[in-house]
Image (cartoon, helix red, strand yellow):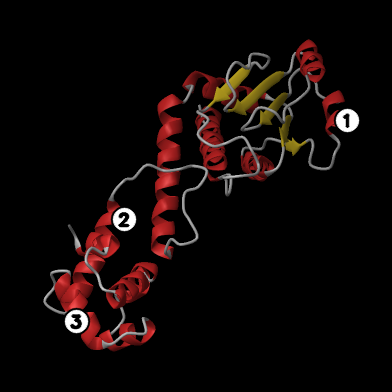
């Protein structure tokens, strides 16, 4: 067992040693820079008690213990552990733990999306957006933030894009959609989307419709860019934030934009 693992196990620790160990585990980011006297004061203990704990853990003294502890922490941070997309970290986690877990979450999200990415659908979406006279984007909540960023990037390609529901005017915008326009809908759950009647009206006008979602079985759109559902659809309960869904949507929009750039230079 490593020193970090022994600290976590607290096997055969005295009451005082457990108290010191708990403090170290709760302040892992700080202990590497603390003197033995500083740790003793912070843990309401003594230098002698800390030395005894270091030796019980297999270290010759406090300096050796501190060096090995830092190495153990860094080694653990390099390990790839399964990520809970709804609860990637907890309040008790240290800052370094949270930084590592968010990094793991974003890396795993991109790998997950990349492995299942419908490239042909991405190409079709990029092609239609580049050919469109006007681009209308529909997105709700956190997805709207991604939509706004994407619309801003499209300006660099000299494409006019508008978030149609940003000010509650989606019905007005949809009435103005014409044949050579494109409508992009972004919804992780697939619940905040255009109504069936609206889609039918758009199809009659001949404009292209694109959906980015994790929902399976959607066929009403001309192109569906689907990615795996790894995060709860619920907005309450265990899920602490929309880390996975919005990282995935950002990645997909970046892919569409990248393909669009390549097509604009052909």
Q: Is residue 52 above or below residue 242?
A: below
- Of the numbered discs 1 and 3, the one sitting upstream in the chain is 3
* Badge 1 vs badge 2, beta-carbon distance below 8 Å: no
Closer to the camera in the image, 150 or 228: 228
x, y (%) of residue 243? 54, 45
Residue matched to label 1? 172
Which picture quadrant has residue 39?
Answer: bottom left
Relative to 197, is 249 on the left or the right? left
Relative horizontal placement of residue 252, taking residue 21 as reference (left or right)? right
Separation of marks 2 and 3 at Cα, in angstroms: 26 Å
- Alpha-carbon neighbours of circle 3 within 10 Å: few (<14), some, or many (≥20)? some
Q: Nearer the viewer, mark 2 or mark 3?
A: 3
Mark 2 and mark 3 in contact? Answer it, CB < 8 Å: no
> Disc 2 designates what residue?
77
Residue wearing tag 3 = 51
| Residue at x-position 39% and y-position 59% | 97
Query: Which one is in front, 210 or 32?
Result: 32
Query: In the rendered image of this protein, does residue 9 appear above or below residue 134?
Result: below
Instruction: Measure the C-alpha gap from mark 1 to mark 3.
Output: 74 Å
Residue in the image at 54% along x and 20% along y: 121
Tell me the residue at 59%/24% (across/down).
215
Q: Label 1 neighbourhood size at 10 Å, few (<14), some (14-19), many (20+)?
A: few
Nearer the observer, disc 1 or disc 3?
3
Mark yes or no: residue 62 visible: no
Q: Secondary structure at mark 1?
A: helix
Residue 121 lies, with reference to residue 185, above or below; the image says above
Q: Is residue 256 visible?
A: yes
Q: Of helix, strand and loop, which one carries label 3?
A: helix
Which x, y percent locates residue 162?
A: 75, 37
Sequence order check, earlier mark of 2 and 3 = 3
Residue 83 left/right relative to 260: left
């Amino acid at each position: 067992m490593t020193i970090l693992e022994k600290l976590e196990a607290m096997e055969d620790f005295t009451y005082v040693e457990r108290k010191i160990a708990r403090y170290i585990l709760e302040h892992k980011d700080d202990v590497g820079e603390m003197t033995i006297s500083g740790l003793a004061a912070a843990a309401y203990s003594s230098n002698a008690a800390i030395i005894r704990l270091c030796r019980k853990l297999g270290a010759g003294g406090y300096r050796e213990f501190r060096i090995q502890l830092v190495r153990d922490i860094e080694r653990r941070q390099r390990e790839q552990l399964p990520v809970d997309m709804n609860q990637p970290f907890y309040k008790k986690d240290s800052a370094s733990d949270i930084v590592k877990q968010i990094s793991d979450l974003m890396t795993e999200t991109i790998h997950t999306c990349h492995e299942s990415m419908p490239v042909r659908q991405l190409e079709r979406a990029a092609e239609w957006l580049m050919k469109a006279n006007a681009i209308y984007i529909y997105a709700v909540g956190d997805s709207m933030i991604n939509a706004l960023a994407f619309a801003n990037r499209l300006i660099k390609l000299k494409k006019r894009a508008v978030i149609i529901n940003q000010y509650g005017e989606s019905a007005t915008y949809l009435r103005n959609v014409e044949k050579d326009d494109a409508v992009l809908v972004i919804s992780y759950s697939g619940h905040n989307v255009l109504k069936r009647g609206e889609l039918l009206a758009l199809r009659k006008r001949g404009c292209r419709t694109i959906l980015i979602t994790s929902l399976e079985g959607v066929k009403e759109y001309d192109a569906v860019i689907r990615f795996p559902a790894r995060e709860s659809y619920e907005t309450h309960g265990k899920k602490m934030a929309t880390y996975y869904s919005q990282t995935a949507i950002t990645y997909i929009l970046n892919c569409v934009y990248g393909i669009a750039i390549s097509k604009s230079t052909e």
